[in-house]
Amino acid sequence: MHVPHSRRFLVLLAALLAAGAVVSVAVPAVIARQVLGEGTNLRYQFVRQTADASGFDSGWHVHPGLVVFQVEEGSVQVFQGSCTARTLGPGDTFIEVPWKPVRARSTGAAVWTTSLFIAAGDQLSIPLTAYSPAQPNPCP
């Protein structure tokens, strides 16, 4: 069997080996995943809510599924993943992370739509005091 010994071949071989080593290290980190929920029956609910001039506070809670929160009028502050509120105005959309504590509040009149996609049989919303009694308020 004849094995080429040219400099070009050796450089190409070294490049292929290096690329293979990089891919073998990077691929497992890219494809790692954790299934948080799975099922064949999906429960969904679309809710339009209106807060009067005195405002609204959802309190800390979790959703066991996907929630899409869209502000139509006024402004709403959303806390999730941080103790710093993200203020949403008309036309803004926020996608809540399943099972992560969230709180929404408005200081005045506002209108928003909440679209919930939850596995059949699960509660649409769970107060954080029931889900995590040891940590009823993630923000001091």
Image (cartoon, rainbow, N blue to C red):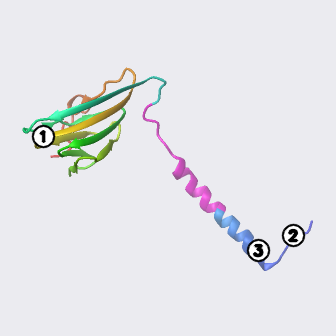
Q: CA distance from mark 2 to mark 3?
A: 11 Å
Q: Which residue is mark 1?
A: 109
Callout 2, which amino acid?
Val
Q: x%, y% of residue 25?
A: 58, 57
On screen, residue 115 versus residue 13, left or right, reads left
Name the residue rendered at 28%, 35% in the picture: 114
Name the residue rendered at 33%, 33% in the picture: 115
Point out the residue furthest to the top here: 121
On screen, residue 100 versus residue 14, left or right, reads left
- Which region shows up in magenta? 20-37
Point out the residue furthest to the right here: 1
Q: Which residue is mark 3?
A: 10
User: Which mark lies nearer to you, 1 or 2?
Assistant: 1
Q: Which residue is mark 2?
A: 3
Mark before the other along the chain sequence, 2 or 3: 2
User: Which mark lies nearer to you, 1 or 3?
Assistant: 1
Callout 3, which amino acid?
Leu
